[in-house]
Each structure stands twice: as structure tokens, then as C-alpha cells.
Amino acid sequence: MTTEEMLRLKGTRFAPYIQLATVLIGKTRSGGGNMFRHQLDTMAILIDYGHIDSVLIKAAIVHDVLEDIPDFNHNLFFSIDYEGHEVYELVREVTKTPDETKPAFLTRILKSGSPNAKILKVADRISNMISLGFVNDMEFVGRYTTETEQYVFPIAELVDKSMLKELQSLVESRRKHVTDFSKIKSEEIHTDSTDFL
């Protein structure tokens, strides 16, 4: 982060948004950790890539609140600061509705999402792809990497080619992980079966 970027963010009030996000502390993730930490990871990814719009950063901090806490009082957004309404609208934009399939949701972001919604979704997916390294359900990892390639690569292509490059690298490494895991399992099965001969 440059000094100029730091000065742009210096007066931004993040603490109230972080406090809102603490409702996610009890929501565990299959890769370990919890949803609260994932919000902050997503924020860090945005800063890492130089996306420091204050509404975007604030939305990253709370981007899963509406989806993961169905009875969350959205009016809390409006009392934080003058950007609360914009933050809420951006969070709503990147929230999958109960009647949406994942492909429909990601296609909606691609085709009609705002630039900030697209950037936030790509940062969110980078964080999720990193977490996949700790997931042992290889069927899920395989599906998720394919979904990322099919639906999220095109979004990243539109908004940030550097983020796309990281996503491509993550997909490649996760596919290798699935292949290596399958080889190990196959060898274990082969070894177990020869033990009885």
C-alpha cells in the first residue's frame, strides 16, 4: 500500500463493520477457521491488489453476513456511517438468494454485477480457493475448482488480470492436490489388497 493509499483510508471507520462481522465467529469453515476470519482475509486480498475503495473494503468485512445469518438486522448497516446504505447494497449484490443456484448467482454477478461486486466476488473466491488446501473432500475440491474456472475466471478477466492470474494458479495447484490425493488413495488400496495375498 502506498502512502497515498494509506492516507485515503486513514479516516475510514472500519471498526463498526468489524464488530458487525463478529456474528460470524461461530460459523466454522470446512477448511478450518471461521467465517469471521474469512471476511478479513477477503479484505486483505483487496488491499493486496490495490482495491481500496472504502465502500468495497467495508463490504468485504461483512460480505457473508446476510447470507450466513438469515435473521441479521440489516438496519444495523444504516446506523454506522454515511456509507452504510452503499455498503449494504453491495453486500446484498454479492449475496446468493435462497432461490438462486450457484451458477445462476455467479452468472448474475458476471452479467449485471457492479464493478465493485465483481472485484469483491473475485477476492472472496481467492480466499476460498486458498482455504481449499485444507479440505479433504476431493470431490468438493474438484467441483469447486471447475466452478471457479467456468464462472469466476470470466469475472476476474473483466476486473483484474492479476487476480485472475492468482486464481488460475490456485486452480492448477488444487487440481494437482486432487490428483496427488487420488494417487495416494489408490496406492493405499493396492497395498491393503496385496496384504491379503
Image: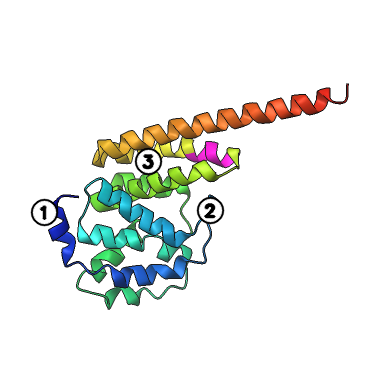
Q: Which residues are magenta?
A: 139-144
Q: Which residue is mark 1?
A: 4
In which quadrant of the rendered view does residue 62 lie?
bottom left
Rendered position, 150 above or below 187: below
Q: Which residue is mark 3?
A: 152
Q: Which residue is mark 2?
A: 32
Helix, strand or loop at disc 2? loop
Which residue is at 43% across, 73% downward?
A: 72
Q: CA distance from mark 2 to mark 3?
A: 23 Å
User: Is 140 a magenta residue?
Assistant: yes
Contact (CB < 8 A) between labels 2 and 1?
no
- 147 vs 40, left or right, is right
Query: Which of pointers 2 and 3 indicates the residue nearer the eye?
Result: 2
Other-residue count near label 3 (Cα within 10 Å), few / some / many at <14 / 14–19 / ≥20: many
Contact (CB < 8 A) between labels 2 and 3?
no
Disc 1 marks a residue whose amino acid type is Glu
Query: Which of pointers 1 and 3 indicates the residue nearer the eye?
Result: 1
